[in-house]
């Protein structure tokens, strides 16, 4: 497995590289909040020598309730991401839900992300792969909660048939375990790396309790915020090449997945620990 890089930025992920970081906010709420989170994370990662990508969604299309906040939408959202990218001089990552969005998103996002529930949607995956390849970016695919890690080979194979270079990062985010619960099998990280791709741990979404937020009687996803550092540390110890984390200046007031995101003030301490673990396991 070779490391992957973003040609326009000093960002690489894979063997022999520092722990990569994809982090930001779950969904774009407003430009001020997003810039504040991105600026803090950029500074922390620069201080620690960790390559950084800002992440935020312009649309959360898989919300539990039709009344849930979804974000600003693709037009306004891509403008916000372009502003963040320009003002902070960092690469950005966002996800898509429809094949028709691929070209527009790849023109702004350096890393295009396929949501877990959609990773087997061939038309979406192929459209995203072609657009990302043409734009010179990378494609992160979240492994679905319902497939085995070694079955990711089928997703990687589809993409490999339509692109001219290696662009795939796989992402572990937990597996369904009974009702309203997810677990992370850290052995899955190595299994996916055997397929020749770098692997990210999405520690934020891995602590979700789908459809189990007591505040809304199940009309939104619950979570266990205190589990994020535990899963992130275990995954990096197991060899994860990159961490995917979501923060907020006031997590309890976040408009999406509030129980799962971390306070931005925790970023430096957690990333410092994760860097140390990466250095130990890379020896």
Image (tube, grey):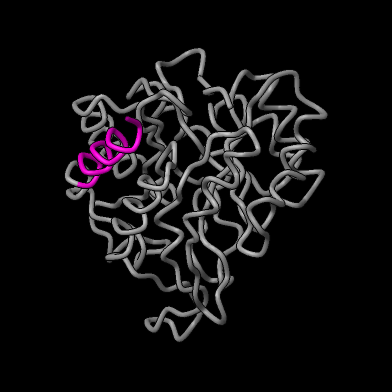
Q: Residue at left 52%, top 61%?
A: 174
* Residue 237 is covered by the magenta coloring: no
Q: Nearer the viewer, residue 88 or 234?
A: 234
Rendered image quadrant of residue 124? top right
Q: Magenta part mainly helix, strand or loop?
A: helix
Q: Residue at left 34%, top 41%?
A: 34
Q: Position of residue 35 (x, y in %)?
A: 31, 36
Rendered image quadrant of residue 130? top right
Q: Position of residue 280 (x, y in %)?
A: 27, 36
Residue furthest to the top in view is: 8
Where does the C terminus fall, quadrant-wise?
top left
Residue furthest to the bottom in view is: 217
Left or right side of 76 for 40: left
Q: Position of residue 75 (x, y in %)?
A: 58, 38
Left or right side of 155 for 36: left
Q: Nearer the viewer, residue 142 or 220?
A: 142
Q: Residue at left 77%, top 51%?
A: 121
Magenta highlight range:
270-283
Quick check: 213 above or below 94? below
Quick check: 196 above or below 176? above
Q: Position of residue 67 (x, y in %)?
A: 53, 71
Q: Residue at left 61%, top 52%?
A: 143
Residue furthest to the front in view is: 283
How many marks do you count on the picture? Answer: 0
Quick check: 215 above or below 86? below
Left or right side of 54 for 178: right
Q: Nearer the viewer, residue 173 or 96?
A: 173
Where does the N terminus fall, quadrant-wise?
top right
């Amino acid at each position: 497995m070779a490391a992957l890089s973003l040609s326009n930025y000093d960002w690489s992920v894979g063997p022999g590289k520092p722990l990569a970081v994809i982090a930001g906010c779950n969904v774009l709420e407003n430009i001020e909040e997003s810039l504040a989170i991105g600026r803090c994370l950029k500074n922390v990662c620069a201080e620690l020598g960790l390559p950084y990508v800002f992440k935020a969604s312009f649309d959360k299309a898989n919300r539990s309730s039709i009344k849930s906040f979804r974000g600003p939408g693709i037009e306004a959202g891509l403008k916000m991401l372009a502003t963040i990218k320009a003002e902070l001089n960092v690469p950005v990552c966002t996800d898509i839900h429809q094949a028709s969005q691929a070209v527009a998103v790849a023109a702004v996002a350096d890393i295009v992300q396929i949501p877990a529930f959609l990773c087997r949607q061939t038309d979406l995956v192929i459209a995203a792969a072609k657009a990302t390849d043409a734009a010179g970016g990378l494609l992160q695919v979240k492994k679905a909660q319902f497939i085995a890690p070694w079955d990711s080979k089928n997703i990687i194979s589809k993409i490999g048939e339509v692109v001219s270079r290696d662009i795939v990062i796989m992402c572990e985010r937990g597996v369904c375990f009974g009702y309203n619960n997810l677990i992370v099998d850290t052995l899955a990280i190595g299994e996916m790396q055997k397929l020749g791709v770098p692997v990210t741990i999405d520690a934020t979404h891995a602590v979700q309790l789908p459809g189990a937020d007591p505040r809304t009687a199940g009309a939104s996803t619950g979570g266990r915020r205190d589990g994020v550092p535990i899963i992130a540390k275990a995954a990096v110890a197991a060899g994860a090449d990159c961490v995917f984390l979501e923060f907020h200046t006031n997590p309890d007031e976040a408009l999406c997945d509030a129980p799962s995101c971390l306070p931005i003030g925790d970023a430096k301490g957690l990333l410092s620990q994760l860097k140390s673990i990466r250095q130990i396991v890379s020896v």
